[in-house]
Amino acid sequence: MSGPGGGDAQRPLRRLGFLTIGLFDPADPRPGHEATLRLVELGEELGFDSAHVRHRHLQHGISSPLTFLAAASQRTTRIGLGTAVTPLGWENPLRLAEDLATVDVLSGGRLQPGVSVGPPMQWEHVRHSLYPDSADVEDFTYERVLRLLRLLRGEPASTFSGRQGIEEFSERVQPHVPGLADRVWYGGGSLRSATWAGEQGLGFLTSSVVRAEGDDTDFARVQRAQVDAFRAAHPDPGRARVSQGLVVIPTDSATPEQRRRYEEYAASRLPRTREPQGPARMLFAPDLVGTTDELVAALRAHAGFRAVDEVVVALPFTFSFDDQVQVLTDLAGSLGPALGWAPGGGDGVTGFPG
C-alpha cells in the first residue's frame, strides 16, 4: 500500500473512517437518526478518524447531513465529520458555504466536506420543485464547486458591507473560517474528474463506483488509473490526499447467522460487478466479506487500495444497528490494526496537505 506519493510499497494505513446513509423509518424517523448519532459516538470511542454521511434527497436516509453533523458535533470531541458527498446540484453555493462554516465552528474545526457536481438525481421529476424559475439555466458544472470554494475563502458575496441602522453587514460569508476551503474533497469516478480535482488541489474521494473508460473493465485497475491521474495533476503530488471508499465487512466476531446474511448480501450484488452498467458504463466493486486475514489478503491484492493510505468503509444501509456495531468493532479492533492503522492515531481533522 502506498503513501501519499503513490507506488506500491507496503506502508501502514494512516486514516480509517466509515460512511452511512442513516436509514430511518419514514413513519417514525427519530429512532433512525438517533441510531446513526450513536454510531458516530461509537466510531469516536473505537478510535475511527472520521465518520461520513451521504445525502439521500427524497429517500428514507439522511437528507440534511449538515444539520445531522451539527448534532453529532455536540456529542463528539475528536472524530472528523464528513459529507460523502454533497451533490451541489441541490445546493446554492452561498447558502451551503454559510452552513459549512457554521458546522465547522460548532465542531471545533472537524468538518471534512465532500462535494460533487452534475444534475440532481431524478432531475426531470424534481426540477420544477427545486428550480421552478431557473431550471433551464442552472450551471451544474465544476464552476459550482469553484463558486463554493471562492465563498469559503472569503471572496465577496455582496457589494455592500458596513452598518445599516443598528445592523452590521459583511461582504463575505459569516462565520468566516480560514482553512475550511482547504478541507474540501471532490467525489469523482472518472479520469476527467480525478484530473480536475488534482488540478484544483482538492482531496479526492474515490468510491466503490467508477466509470469504465476505454477497454479496461477491471474495477481495481480503473480506480488505480484515476488515483494516479489525480496525483499527476495535483500541484503537490507527494501531499495529495486520496480516500478510497469500499464495502468491507469483517466477520471475526459475527455470529453464524450474521455471516450467512453478509455473504448473501454480497452475493446478491455480485452480478452488477461483472460488466459495466448503463450508458455511463459504471463499474461496481465487489463487496468484500471475510475474516481479517482474508480481507487483508484481498485488499493488498487490490490495485486501487495499494495506491491509498486513507480508507472510508461504507456500511451497507440495509444492515441492522447491531450488524453495523459488529462491523465497526471488527474494523477498529482487528482489520484496521492488521493493516497498520492505530485507533485514534491518524489526524482526521486537518486540511490539505495532510
Image (cartoon, helix red, strand yellow):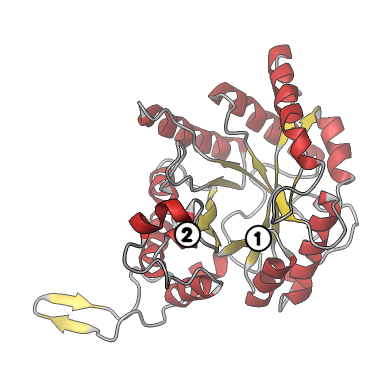
Q: Which mark is residue 188?
A: 1
User: For the residue labelled by badge 1, is the local secondary structure a helix, a strand or a loop?
Assistant: loop
Q: Are marks 2 and 1 in contact (CB under 8 Å)?
A: no
The amino acid type found where label 2 is placed reads: Gly
Q: Can residue 12 be seen?
A: yes
Tell me the quarter of the picture where residue 117 sits: bottom right
Would you say 10 lies left or right of 209 here?
A: right
> Residue at (36%, 57%) from the top-left corner?
128
Tell me the quarter of the picture where residue 274 sits: top right
Q: Which residue is mark 2?
A: 109
> Residue at (57%, 37%) from the top-left corner?
43
Q: Position of residue 125 (x, y in %)?
A: 43, 51
Would you say 218 lies left or right of 266 here?
A: right
User: Of circles 2 and 1, which is in front?
Assistant: 1
Mark 2 burial class by Cα count in 10 Å: few <14, some 14-19, many 20+: many
Depicted 282 relative to depicted 290: above or below: below
- Is residue 93 or residue 216 the one in the foreground? 216
User: For the residue labelled by badge 2, is the local secondary structure a helix, a strand or a loop?
Assistant: loop
Q: Position of residue 303 (x, y in %)?
A: 86, 52
